[in-house]
Amino acid sequence: MKKISIVLLVIAVTLSGYSKELSLDEAINIALKNSYQLKAAKKKLKSKELEYKATKGIRWPTITFSEMFMRTNIPGWAMMNELNQHRLTMNSSSKYVDMTSFNILYPGMFQPPHYPEWNNWQTKIQFQVPIWAGGKIGTGIEMRKKEFEATKFDLQRTKQKVIYDVTKAYLGAVLAKEGIKLAKQAYKSVKKHYETAKVMYDNGLAIYADVLRAKVYLTKVKAKIAEAENQYLIAKRGLLLAMGVDNLDPAQIDVTGQLTFKMPEKDIKYWQEVAVSERPDLIALRTRVETARKYIDFQKADMLPTIGAFGYYQMDDRYNPFGTDGTGFTLGVALNWKIFDGFQAYNKYKAAKETYKQYSNLKKGFEEYIKFSVFKAYKELNTARNKLKAAEENLKYAEEVLKITEKRYKNQMASMIDLLDTQTMYDQIKFEKAKATYDANISLLELKYQSGKLKENNGGDK
């Protein structure tokens, strides 16, 4: 079932007939409500919560009700059933036991046993309650609680992955939209060159080949606009996929973001410290290391005795269910201690210790890997920033060169080939600057993701 925000988005776009403007915040909010990956993670968390609640129930008594019917001619069972029904007498017991020897004292009183069939309806309510299990119950509950808490951090990391994917896809759509804008600007500039060439040709100041060259280049740029528009549609379809929206035409949305970049002032030490202290999947692993440590005590409990209480109330009747021909109760306390099991419990205890060491090493290795990931992302961010600065400088130079070449062509000091080559260089550098801005934003996004700083508020720092 789709969320209300998705439904409203579809209805608004359909009724308006125009593209719905979509901000990054809106895209992230929709994805957090509609992502299949996130829904699966939430279901997993709910499952762990219910497992935790189920484990806590072990502390409570187990109460069982049963109703059983039995018909038997096995002497022991038949006699026991009649006894439980409070119907067994000395005379009736002769049906199961040979008492003819007593006929010497009481002539003709007892017949030989004939082992009749006997019915019994047994109604029983019984309970069992653990008193002490070597600490296994408390440890097991704590382990389930830790796993539940670890899964909460898994959910947080999944949210960050959804935000990362949506933000990356959104920035890709913004870049594609910028590509359309740049292609149209290039078309406008080339059209101006074409018109200049026509005027100069009409005045005998240029050859007709210049007009044709400008015309051919103008056609190529026009094709680039169509290509850029298709790339924009593809990027928006990818964005909708990341948002978990599959019932909307990408042509019906329009991203509103701008390609701007601001370098954070934090150093690499800050990002690494944040990652080690805040990254949810690392916190989840640390929690599971604690679970592995408690698992040692859990296995150790199998080598200790257990004490429990039990009892039941029983009703037996020959003819009716829930009948009360005979009633009785039992109460008791039991101690069980497995003295020898072929060293099974001991070896499981040792295996639990090794598992704890395994998780401890995994935690240390993962911490170092995260530090490396942050280091790599930080250095790549610096590289992207330097490329952006170079692209900005190159754009200034390209602008100046284009202006000079335009003047030189008008003054018949440069050819149309020179002008179009310069225009091509300028258009390419403009797109490289836009791409460098996009790359810098993606590098910053990667740094935030690797350090665990992506939040629901647009991936910003808290």
Image (cartoon, helix red, strand yellow):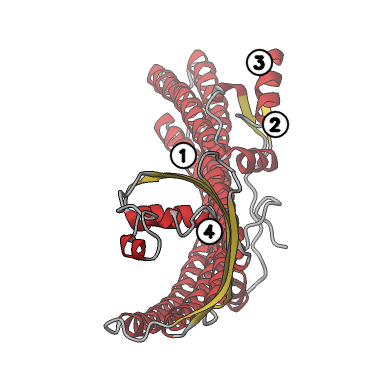
Which tag, 1 or 4, sits closer to the chain's start? Answer: 1
Image spot of residue 264 (x, y percent): 66, 65
Neighbours of disc 1 within 10 Å: few (<14), some (14-19), many (20+): many
Name the residue tied to disc 3.
14
Asked if residue 229 is positioned above or below residue 257 in the image, the reply reads above
Q: Secondary structure at mark 1?
A: helix
Q: Secondary structure at mark 3?
A: helix
> Disc 3 or disc 1, which is closer to the eye?
3
Amino acid on which disc 4 is placed: Glu
Please give the name of the residue rendered at 37% of the width and 20% of the height, measured from the top-left corner.
Answer: 209
Residue 5: which disc? 2
Q: Could you say whether the residue bearing mark 4 is in a helix, strand or loop?
A: helix
Q: Where does label 4 land, which residue?
A: 446
Q: CA distance from mark 1 to mark 4?
A: 35 Å
Amino acid type for the residue under numbered disc 3: Thr
Q: Earlier in the sequence, mark 3 or mark 2?
A: 2
Residue found 44% across the figure and 32% down from its top: 420
**Mark drawn on residue 179:** none
In the picture shown, does residue 345 fall above or below 234?
below
Residue for badge 1: 422
Give the mark, 3 or 1, whose residue is nearer the N terminus.
Answer: 3
Q: Is residue 270 visible?
A: yes
Residue at the extreme left = 342
Question: Nearer the viewer's eye, disc 1 or disc 4?
Answer: 4
Q: Position of residue 5 (x, y in %)?
A: 70, 31
- Name the foreground residue: 141 vs 313: 313
Which is more N-terminal, label 2 or label 4?
2
